[in-house]
Amino acid sequence: MIYGSGQGPEMDRILESVAHDLAADGLRLAGAVQHTAHPASSPRCGMVLEDLGSGGIHPIAVDPDIEVQGCRMEPEKIETLAMLAGEAIDRGADLFVLNRFGKNEIAGRGYRDVISEAVSRGIPVLVGVSSANAGKWDAFASAGYERLDIDGEAARAWCRKAVDARRRQREQTCLMKT
């Protein structure tokens, strides 16, 4: 899903809602969605990621007790959470969701390898990409993706359709092997 300048918080809310709805429907998820633990008026950076495979909430800011201008993420925390997402993929995730393809992924870190692994296994991937990073996403993903507008219902429908298509393909493959 491509989102424009200033739409990041809306994207976060949409992806969180989509992920929770799909998990409630019984889909096994991998990836992460972002939450803000403090109100926008707070001087503290309260950015946290919810690991969708475990439901765990993890702070990712450099130090949530230090007042900073803007939020800075701690790369090591992102790497640890990316490993958790990889483990969820290994456990048989139906869908991978990530709120941002951002600086870490552009630099070859963060969730980049996990996204690649999900794609290589045929797992549908729903990722938020800012319009500022769309060119970098295009270079990473090549032409093998479908752009979605920032719309929760469209995202839910796409995810369900993609997961169903993958299941049908796997069932056909199993039938052919027997």
Image (cartoon, helix red, strand yellow):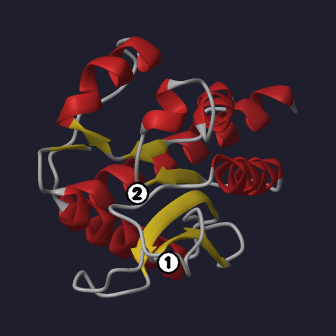
Decide if residue 64 is on the left or right side of residue 176: left
Residue 15 shown left or right of residue 57 in the figure: left
Q: Element type at marker 1?
A: loop
Label 2 sits on a secondary structure element that is helix
Residue nearest the viewer, comparing 63 with 127: 63
Callout 2 crowding tier (Cα within 10 Å): few <14, some 14–19, many ≥20: some
In x, y percent, where is residue 30?
A: 63, 57
Location of residue 42 (image quadrant): bottom left
**Above or below, comparing residue 59 to residue 109 in the picture:** below
Q: Residue at x 53, y 55 (%)?
A: 73
Query: Which residue is denoted by mark 2 in the rendering?
Result: 160
- Amino acid type at circle 2 is Arg
The foreground one among 34 and 46 is: 46
Indicate which disc residue 15 carries.
none
**In x, y percent, where is residue 56?**
68, 78
Question: Pointers 1 and 2 in contact (CB under 8 A)?
Answer: yes
Point out the image quarter for the N terminus: top left
Q: Position of residue 27 (x, y in %)?
A: 58, 67
Please give the name of the residue rendered at 66% of the width and 38% of the height, measured from the top-left corner: 114
Residue at position x 47%, y 52% in the image = 98
Name the residue located 36 percent from the left edge and 69 percent from the top edge. 18
- Measured as percent of width and height from the top left, residue 88 is found at 75, 57
**172 or 159, nearer to the observer:** 159
* Cα gap from disc 1 to disc 2, whole angstroms: 10 Å
Foreground residue among 64 and 170: 64
- Label disc, if present, on residue 25 of the rendered structure: 1
Type of amino acid at the residue the image marks with label 1:
Asp
| Left or right, residue 93 beside residue 139 | right
Up-down: is 31 above or below 64? above
